Image (spheres, helix red, strand yellow):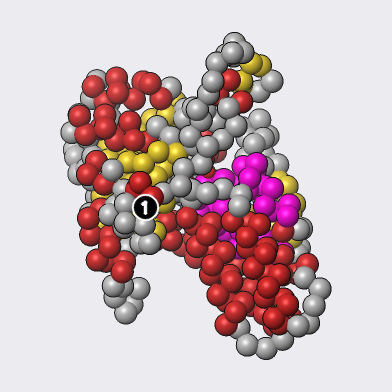
Amino acid sequence: MLYPVVWRDDRVALIDQNRLPRELTQVEIRRSDDMAMAIKTMIVRGAPAIGVAAAYGMYLGAREIETRDRTAFLERLEAVGQMLRETRPTAVNLFWAIERMLKVARTTPGSVEQVRQTLLETAKAINAEDIETCQAIGDRGLEVLPNQPGKLRLLTHCNAGALATAGYGTALGVVRSAYTAGRLERLYADETRPRLQGAKLTTWECIYDGIPVTVITDSMAAHCMQQTMIDAVVVGADRIAANGDTANKIGTYSLALVAKAHNIPFFVAAPKSTVDLSLSNGSQIPIEERDPAEIYQIGETRLVPKGAEFYNPAFDVTPAELISAIITEQGAIAPGELQSIFANPSPAS
Ligand code: MRU
């Protein structure tokens, strides 16, 4: 299996996702500011993966703080958290992981060195938990995929695979579980303009794991649905508001609208850590805007003549009413039930 974020020999090894599919290489990160830059420049990307990366970034920052005074240490760790928060605004897993690390730092008794050690253990735990969570999401997804005589043809957008998590993937985790269970005929992967995570990463991951994949441009999805080539759509999420409205890669919303028009189930697969109950609806989710160069050029080649203006939102919000179910590690949940299930967790969860 692919592990995009690995703790090894006192440093973090990140798969450099900007170099895929040309080459599979790792970047070694030893400092918290380098981790912030890796998140910002999308060497590591995908909501759960940047959460795990930020958790290790917090430990790296803790290691850099040269003091034995707890109060001074905690103050400077808050500043590391702020630096990591300022990398990308939409995926809530980033903020969730930073908060969890800060809470551990505040509540762990003992010396600064003991707090540092607990922070490393917590980052490793966040990493390991995410792999388990994704496997659970994959398996719970099988319970809601259409039960039909033939094998399934699924469509996904962007990359919500092993590369976007600590391993296995969320939406691609469901696809992976369907493939392993012998229920998948083929995955259709939207190329996902402008950064092409579908064409570059999802396709690479599928080929790596032997999952049959057909790549289409984003504008072909409606046609494929009209031609009855798609049985269900499965996508990931960057942030889910309390009412089920879901932010995911730009283009997800139009896919959901088209799926609705063709009566095709539309599933969001995401861990509980992607749910942000502090936001009542999707209009409150901050949407990242990225460099217009992502639109006007590919590699070093400029495609669009100079003189135009550009708008490059990296995410959009799919309203809850277009989502058939949200597949979490606890099973598939109707978007409208998120609040009651996650605000009042059962003692076991
Ligand atoms: O800009 P990216 O590549 O970080 O966006 C990734 C996505 O939109 C994914 O679908 C989402 O983070 C879910 S990843 C399991």
Q: Residues within 10 Å of mark 1 (few under 14, many from 20)?
A: many
Which image quadrant is residue 258 in? top left
* Residue 41 among those drawn in magenta: yes
Residue 1 shows up from this direction? no
Q: Amino acid at mark 1?
A: Ile
What residue lies at 35% left-to-right and 46% top-to-bottom?
Answer: 283
Give x and y (percent) for residue 90. Answer: 48, 48
Give x and y (percent) for residue 66. Answer: 81, 73
Q: Is mark 1 within 8 Å of ligand 1?
A: no
* Residue 312 among those drawn in magenta: no
Residue bearing the label numbered 1: 240
Give the answer, above or below, for where 167 lies relative to 117. above
As rendered, which of 299 and 277 lies closer to the eye?
277
As rendered, which of 120 and 251 lies closer to the eye?
251
Outermost residue, top direction?
305
Which image quadrant is residue 344 in? bottom left
Outermost residue, right direction?
66
As rendered, which of 254 and 150 lies closer to the eye?
254
As rendered, which of 31 and 291 lies closer to the eye?
291
Give the answer, above or below, for where 303 lies relative to 274. above
Residues shaded magenta: 33-60
What residue lies at 48% left-to-right and 50% top-to-bottom?
Answer: 91
Give x and y (percent) for residue 181. Answer: 34, 48
Residue 314 shows up from this direction? yes
- Say what secondary structure mark 1 lies in: strand
Outermost residue, bottom direction?
110
Q: Main secondary structure of the magenta part?
A: helix
In-image side of 60 versus 283 (left or right): right
What residue lies at 60% left-to-right and 83% top-to-bottom?
Answer: 108
